[in-house]
Amino acid sequence: MRKDKKIALNYYQYNFVIAEPYRDILLAMLSELPFDTFEETPEGLHAFIPEPDTDQEAIAAQLSEWQQQWPFQYAVTFIPAQNWNAVWESNFQPIVVDDFCGVRADFHEPSQGVEYELVINPKMAFGTGHHETTYMMMQAMRNLSLAGARVLDYGCGTGILAILAAKMGASLVDAVDIEEESAANSIENARLNQTPDIRVFHGTLDAVGPGPYDVILANINRNVILESLPALYAMTASPGVLLISGVLQTDEDLVTTQAESQGFRKTESRHRGAWAAVVMDKS
Amino acid sequence: MAKEIEVFIKLQVKGAQANPAPPIGPALGSKGVNIMEFCKRFNAVTQDKPGKILPVLISVYKDKSFDFVIKTPPAAIQLLEASKLKSGSPEPNRKKVGSVTWDQVKDIAEDKMPDLNCFTLDSAMRMVAGTARSMGITVAGTPPWGGEAE
């Protein structure tokens, strides 16, 4: 498992003009070079590769060999890293979770009639409250007494849940994300919300101390949660709570069963859209 | 009322590995779609296929919402994977990629039948075998319809 990831990379885009029967073959071969994502176009194919993985000479040599077998032409363009989410970010509407918590960007007017207000400038990190999973995590947090608690936000994205925990009175808040941009964004948002005591780490659970934490928040994805369950159990205090989301309802039983086999006990589950959030207790 | 479509985007993305980089970032971002929401959903529904290249047809609507459909990987990708499984040596950049069995060709043909415009499984298998040949992958053994491999 990789210990860190970087999203904001420069990319090379290779534009191929190639006839239909050969397009899929070229795509398959390119995936080994290693181009990682493709866009089908009427003329053929655009193939994308991060700059650090790009050995332009080796790729050119390989392509000219393949050109003998399947006729195609290509051109290369450079795409500098940038915040691709900027358009959405500049237009998004503030969100209010019940009468509990409002989330807005710094350019919005303050939300009215909410207990807690968070200001999040998300850039390319996940977590603004618009998504069902974040929304349910915040609803579930409302039912926990976080005053004085030690809290870990695992897969913190924008840091939104860590910031809410800090505002709810947690005495210690740690946040960790495998993506460099998310860790950086969490630090930025923590400052913006006057919760600078949140400690942000970059990496996997190994990057964080051993705990114990009274509450662990894990809005990630099914596979990462399943892999992490033994470590999460070890890091949860007795008694303590693990709050899981980022899983589809179709995966809820699998995640619940495996968490229970670790020793957790399911006390609550929520559903919104296709998504599930599960509250697990450790006694 | 059905939602009015702004644009269709046809991508091929590795399962469980969508991120806001190109082409997803610029393709969706320029339309004002929340890229992170697409990535979260795509990655959640592809947790069983991490790292496998999957065609995804994304519909972006005028109201900035989106939907997507994931299809099975192209025959060429499946052949490449099948040939690696067999030889056990995933060495990229080699001219001769390896070999597959007729059973593997049959599995891929069955999987891709709906996309191949073939009326019979035999013709789909011939088409998949032809793709394998173009890629330098040999199909070992005798085809189910007898005779030599074409």
Image (cartoon, rainbow, N blue to C red):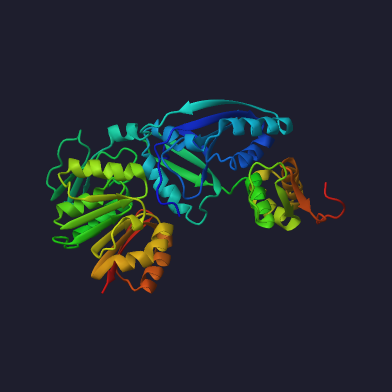
Examine the rendered structure and indicate whether residue A101 appears above or below residue A61: below
Image location (x, y in percent) of residue B74? 62, 45
Foreground of the two, A282 or A248: A282
Foreground of the two, B139 or A173: A173
Image location (x, y in percent) of residue A143? 19, 62
Image quadrant holding the C terminus of chain A, namely bottom left
Tell me which residue sits at (14%, 61%) in the image.
A148
From the viewer's perspective, tell me whether residue A129 is left or right of residue B21. left
Count up the numbered dots: 0
Examine the rendered structure and indicate whether residue A39 appears above or below residue A139: above
Foreground of the two, A99 or A22: A22
Snapshot quadrant of residue B103:
bottom right
Tell me which residue sits at (63%, 44%) in the image.
B92
Can residue A236 be seen? yes
Image quadrant holding the N terminus of chain A, namely bottom left
Snapshot quadrant of residue A138:
bottom left
Image location (x, y in percent) of residue B142? 83, 55
